[in-house]
Image (cartoon, grey):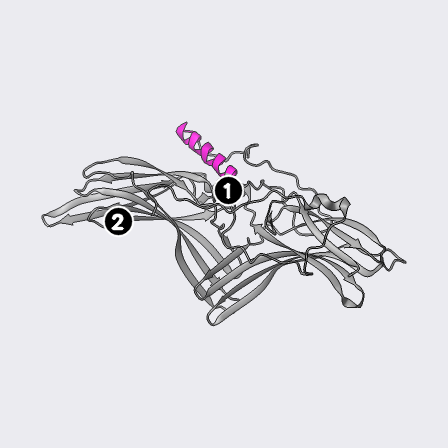
């Protein structure tokens, strides 16, 4: 083939062959073309495509959720194509801020995924084209005011249980679980608490915490399927209130695994989460409390933690709770430059993506559409230098976990 093409995204974190981008954020890239002979071509173009697929026994649906196409080069009047040489073409694009995040799910008969690819193509004569594809991991952008609202006030749930014995009433146990926020971030920690009022003759052994995910698959034809299952468990063995001990307050330091995929709602999929607290009582029924929570993208961690700290300080000082402006340690409101090639939607609230763990179920490692990756000419060799990489960490539960 007299022409080869390669494409790179600049300033974007990468793992293996996947680029990690935020919906709503301007993404810059460069296409590199080498013509070893005169190439008769009509255009060189970039395309970004996102697809959403759900499938289970008796039902299947697929939807195109993003389809962006734009040229980055066309011959001038009187030209018929590319002369011999090496060429570079800069471009940028923006995914809509409400684009759903990348998602991979398979459980029994159920299968679902949301996948994004970027392709760069040289359109040759006679309908032939030379193309290369990049595979993208997309995070859904959550506006900063929405993150702040999740930490405006602690969430509290109370539950109680009356116990009996062979001699009559054995008393009651009441537990109050408190979360500082109904938003959580993968790879970050959160300090919750449990206040146990034990007016019974039974011992409280420990507190158990489970993060559950609810998946709803649906088709445009009206079919749907719902599954609820646990993702992660943690035990707090130091929550061991003895009998007849009132007002025993314990801190719950929760370290959320880095591999939890954010909550979202799309046309064919709903992925939501809840935290389930269980107070284990020796010889008696457990006390159970449920919190609906939103898993945010990892990049939102500093924004969320800053707001949690501010709310806590204001409440301790007796002040009225209000939102705070993002600080340099969290996220500054960045003016995004205008788009000139990719179209899409602008956003003026972007937070940086920290070096965090990867989502657990990535698509199969991609291969280039045209076989082997084309070699780059010497003047473009710097594009082959390693990009900042993310690694999927091995999650080691804290001592006492089940």
Q: How many angstroms separate mark 2 from mark 1 (CA)?
A: 33 Å
In what quadrant of the picture does the N terminus appear? bottom right
Q: Residue furthest top?
A: 317
Query: Compared with residue 242, is residue 135 higher up or lower down, i.e. above or below?
Result: below
- Say the numbered circle drawn on residue 355: none
The image shows residue 114, relative to residue 327, as above or below, that is: below
Residue under the image location 21 percent in, 42 percent down: 203
Residue under the image location 78 percent in, 53 percent down = 34
Q: Is residue 363 visible?
A: yes
**Do the residues under discs 2 and 1 have CB atoms within 8 angstroms?**
no
Q: What stretch is highlighted in magenta?
A: 302-319
- Residue 342 is situated, as x and y percent measured from the top left of the image, at 70, 52
User: Going by the image, does 153 lie left or right of 63?
Assistant: left
* Label whose residue precedes the other's in the sequence (2 or 1): 1
Front residue of 116/390: it is 390
375 versus 328 height, above or below: below
Specify the label residue 147 is tagged with: 1
Res 61 quadrant in image? bottom right
Say left or right for 135 vs 251: right
Q: Could you tell me which secondary element the residue under label 1 belongs to? A: helix
Which residue is denoted by mark 2 in the rendering? 286
**Residue situated furthest bottom in the rendering:** 58
Residue 252 percent across, percent down from the top left: 35, 39
Side of 279 relative to 150 (left or right): left
In-front residue for pair 31/56: 31
Q: Residue at x 52, y 48 (%)?
A: 358
């Amino acid at each position: 083939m007299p022409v080869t093409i390669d494409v790179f995204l600049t300033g974007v974190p990468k793992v293996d062959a996947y680029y990690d981008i935020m919906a709503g954020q301007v993404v810059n890239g460069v296409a590199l073309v080498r013509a070893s002979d005169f190439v008769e071509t009509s255009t060189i173009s970039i395309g970004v495509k996102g697809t959403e697929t759900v499938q289970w026994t008796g039902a299947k649906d697929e939807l195109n959720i993003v389809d962006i196409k734009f040229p980055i080069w066309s011959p001038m009047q009187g030209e018929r194509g590319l002369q011999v040489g090496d060429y570079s073409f800069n471009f940028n694009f923006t995914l809509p801020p409400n684009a759903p995040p990348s998602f991979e799910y398979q459980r029994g008969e159920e299968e679902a995924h949301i996948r994004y690819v970027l392709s760069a193509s040289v359109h040759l004569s006679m309908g032939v084209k030379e193309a290369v594809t990049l595979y993208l991991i997309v995070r859904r952008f959550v506006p900063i005011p929405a993150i702040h609202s999740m930490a405006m006030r602690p969430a509290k749930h109370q539950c109680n249980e009356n116990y009996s014995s062979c001699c009559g009433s054995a008393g009651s146990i009441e537990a109050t679980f408190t979360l500082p926020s109904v938003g959580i971030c993968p790879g970050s920690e959160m300090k919750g608490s449990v206040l146990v009022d034990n007016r019974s003759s039974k011992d409280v052994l420990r507190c158990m915490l489970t993060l559950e995910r609810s998946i709803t698959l649906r088709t445009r034809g009206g079919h749907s399927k719902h599954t609820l299952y646990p993702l992660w468990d943690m035990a707090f063995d130091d929550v061991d209130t003895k009998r007849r001990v009132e007002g025993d307050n314990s801190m719950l330091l929760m370290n959320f695994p880095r591999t939890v995929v954010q909550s979202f709602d799309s046309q064919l999929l709903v992925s939501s989460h809840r935290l389930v607290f269980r107070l284990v009582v020796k010889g008696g029924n457990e006390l159970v409390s449920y919190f609906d929570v939103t898993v945010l993208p990892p990049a939102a961690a500093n924004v969320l933690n800053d707001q949690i700290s501010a709310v806590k300080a204001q409440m301790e000082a007796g002040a009225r709770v209000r939102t705070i402006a993002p600080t340099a340690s969290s996220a500054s409101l960045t003016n995004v430059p205008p788009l000139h090639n990719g179209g899409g939607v602008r956003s003026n609230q972007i937070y940086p993506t920290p070096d965090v763990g990867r989502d657990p179920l990535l698509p199969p490692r991609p291969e280039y559409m045209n076989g082997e990756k084309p070699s780059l000419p010497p003047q473009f060799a710097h594009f082959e230098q390693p990009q900042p990489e993310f690694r999927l960490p091995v999650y080691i539960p804290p001592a006492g976990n089940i």
